[in-house]
Amino acid sequence: MDQPAALSDLPADRRRRARMVRDQLADCGDQRVLAAMAALPRHLFVPAEGRGSAYDDAPLAIGCGQTISQPRLVARMLALLALRPGMRVLDVGAGSGYAAALLWRLSAPDGQVLAVERQGALAAAARPLLAGLAPGVELVHGDALALASGRFDAIHVACACPGLPAQLAARLAPGGILVAPVAEADGRQHLVRWRAGSAPEALDDVLFVPALPGVVAE
C-alpha cells in the first residue's frame, strides 16, 4: 500500500469523518470509541485508489488479499473490548494499522499496544504511518497465533479463526477480554467475546479473511 507524502487531513476529510460517525456509528454506545474514530483519519490507512470510499460503511481492499474492516464493525469490536487507559492490548492481523491506532488512542496515555501482521508488505507500509499517528504502537512482522509469551488486558483479532482461538485466550490477563471472528465448520463466521474466566459469547454474524499461520516476507 502506498503511503501519502504527508499525513494530510483536510477540512473535507474531517467533514466526511463526522458524517461517518453521525450516520453510521450512532448505535455504537461507547463515546470514547466514537471520539477516537472521529479524530483518526481513516483515509490515510487505505490505498490511494480507495480513499474516496474511506468513510463508506464497507470493507476496503488494502493489498495482499487483505481488507480494512467497515467502520461499523470496527466500532462494534472496540466497544466490546471495553478499553481503558493503561491497558496492554494485542492486535492480531494489524493490516494497514487502522485498528491498532484506535486501540492505542483508547488505551493512552500509558497503555501499550502490540500489533502483529503476518504480511511483510503491509507491516512495512503501516510502520511509518503508525509512527506519525500512533507512536505508542509496537508493530511486529510475525505470526500472532504463535506467540509464546505475554499477557494482555484486551485482544483484538481481525481475521477469522478456525474455531475458538484458545491459544490467544490463554494470553488474557485476569479479567481480560478477547474479541474475534470465529469460523465454523460450515463456513459461517460469528463474532465472539471471551472474557477470561468466563464462557465465550457468540454475537453477530460477520465475514473476515481467514487467519493463516506463518509469515509472508515483503
Image: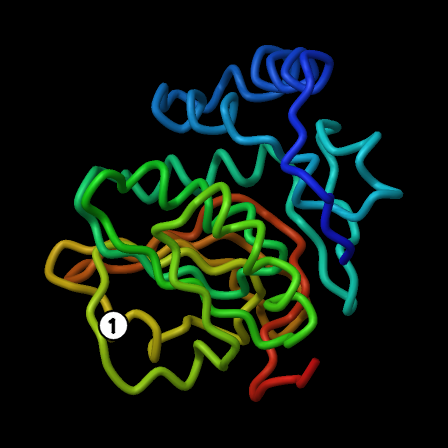
Q: Is residue 140 above or below residue 194?
A: below
Q: Is residue 114 above or below residue 101?
A: below
Specify the color scheme: rainbow
Residue 57 appears left or right of 97 = right
Q: Is residue 176 above or below residue 51?
A: below
Picture residue at 42% right of the left edge, 21% below the top: 35
Question: Residue 128 at what x, y percent from top left?
Answer: 57, 56
Tell me where residue 51 sits by quadrant: top right
Of all residues, the one furthest to the left in this rendering is 174
Q: Quadrant of the image for the N terminus?
A: bottom right
Residue 7 appears left or right of 178 = right
Local SS, label 1: loop
Tell me where residue 25 sits by quadrant: top right
Residue 75 appears left or right of 10 = left
Tell me where residue 79 sits by quadrant: top left
Question: Residue 195 at what x, y percent from top left?
Answer: 23, 55
* Nearest the eye: 159 or 201: 159
Question: Residue 60 at what x, y percent from top left?
Answer: 77, 46
Of all residues, the one furthest to the right in this rendering is 49
Picture residue at 69% right of the left edge, 19% below the top: 10
Picture residue at 41% right of the left edge, 73% below the top: 165
* Nearest the eye: 26 or 86: 86
Q: Quadrant of the image for the C terminus?
A: bottom right
Q: Amino acid at mark 1?
A: Arg
Question: Residue 100 at what x, y percent from top left?
Answer: 46, 51
Q: Which residue is mark 1?
A: 171
Q: Residues within 10 Å of mark 1 (few under 14, many from 20)?
A: many
